[in-house]
Amino acid sequence: MKAIYIRRYGNNQVVEYGERPKSQPGNGQLLVQVHAAGVNPVDFKIRDGKAKLIMPGALPLVLGNELSGVVVQTGAGVSRFKVGDAVFARMDIQKIGAFAEYAVVDEGDAAFKPANLSHVQAAAVPLAALTAWQALFEKADLKAGHTVLIHAGSGGVGTLAIQLAKSVGAVVATTVGARNVDLVRSLGADIVIDYARARFEDCVRDCDVILDTQGGAIQQRSFSLLKRGGTLVTINGMPDRAFAQRFKLNPLLGWMFHLANSKPRRLAQAAGGRYEYLFMHPSGEQLTQIARLLESGAVKPVIDRVFPLAQTAEALAYSGTGRATGKVVIEVRPAA
Ligand SMILES: NC(=O)c1ccc[n+]([C@@H]2O[C@H](COP(=O)([O-])OP(=O)(O)OC[C@H]3O[C@@H](n4cnc5c(N)ncnc54)[C@H](OP(=O)(O)O)[C@@H]3O)[C@@H](O)[C@H]2O)c1
């Protein structure tokens, strides 16, 4: 099968387009004919070797973390899906390979593709939407009437986070560049902060939840906006001990993560709130709930650019600029 893969870590020069063997689905797994695959910052981080701590011995590696496609074979014990079903999924990070004509997906990570979405649209959803869902509803407990500040509302995660927050009746504040002000308003944002013209500290306060997609100074400045009892969830900070445990890393490393997080923990405490690090996880169950919101029209994917499989290196470079509006998608099998 045709696939995008690496044999060593590095920049886009190491990204190859060529033939790779098609895997067979094991127990509880689906073989999916990939129609489209979403691009995420984690893809170029994996290509660079920044994730090798949690992906030991992965090379050679077919890249790509999320997909939409059709089940062509099922492994033993599969009960929810059958051949011919259209599915979408964020794959387990230790079993990736969506930038290919075929990919093996754990049944528990997949959900039925919303019928009203094309494969390109569906492939833009799983990783970013699950990240937003887990940040807002698992790590924080976002509810109707709460105020949430979402940094980078125009990004892959941000565009979906705004809509998920609105779907539960939260008041949404978000930071964006001038060119994306109208977009985030159309997604439902109530308070839109042009980050080049205003300091977000001057535009919003008493936040029940803050979704930090940026880390660094933006994260540090955000703690002062937390309401007593509020939660700042970062998806761009130093991992925590739970991350080390989940990936069975050396416990010493877990302690180092814990120590490195003492400053944000202190800042959260000073504000009377909580600090949480999220490294998202696949979940077919949560994706099924997100699929309902997509089917009802409450949530819509925002797609910036679509590339063919052979041009995945260009797609990674484009995503790597950090300037995409919504998602970048690879169309693996163009619609007939
Ligand atoms: N921990 C996890 O589980 C997890 C999961 C998903 C993503 N992430 C991480 O979260 C980050 C965001 O992911 P993503 O997929 O949303 O990225 P993305 O789509 O590449 O984000 C690009 C967007 O961010 C906006 N942006 C950049 N700097 C900004 C700033 N200072 N203020 C406001 N907006 C800004 C850009 O708008 P302008 O061009 O107008 O600046 C652009 O629209 C990445 O670092 C990613 O690796 C982590």
Image (cartoon, rainbow, N blue to C red):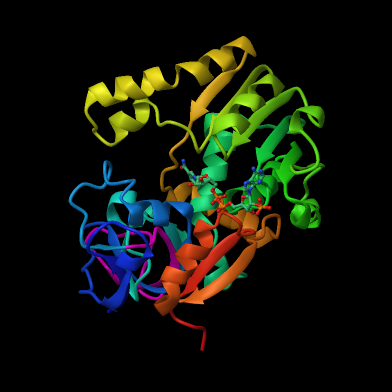
Q: Which of 254 and 22 lies nearest the eye of the viewer?
A: 254
- Any magenta on residue 92? no
Give the left or right position of residue 40, taking residue 73 as reference.
Answer: right
Give the left or right position of residue 304, taking residue 315 as reference.
Answer: right
- Horizontal and vertical percent for residue 297? 70, 60
Give the left or right position of residue 333, taking residue 189 as reference.
Answer: left
Give the left or right position of residue 248, taking residue 324 as reference.
Answer: left
Question: Where 78 sits versus 334, above or below?
Answer: above
Q: Is residue 187 visible?
A: no
- Tally the marks: 0
Q: Which of 167 and 6 lies nearest the eye of the viewer?
A: 6
- Horizontal and vertical percent for residue 110? 41, 57
Give the main secondary structure of the magenta stretch: loop
Q: Which of 156 and 164 lies nearest the eye of the viewer?
A: 156
At horizontal 71% and vertical 23% (from top left) the residue drawn is 225
At horizontal 29% and vertical 29% (from top left) the residue drawn is 245
- Any magenta on residue 64? yes
Q: Which of 189 and 320 lies nearest the eye of the viewer?
A: 320
- Horizontal and vertical percent for residue 33? 36, 75
Question: Where 306 sits versus 47, above or below?
Answer: below
- Most extreme residue toward the bottom is 336
Q: Is residue 279 visible?
A: yes
The residue stretch that appears in magenta: 63-85
At horizontal 68% and vertical 59% (from top left) the residue drawn is 296
Question: Where 224 sits versus 209, above or below?
Answer: above
Q: Quadrant of the N terminus?
A: bottom left
- Horizontal and vertical percent for residue 210? 64, 31
At horizontal 52% and vertical 84% (from top left) the residue drawn is 335
Q: Quadrant of residue 196?
A: top right
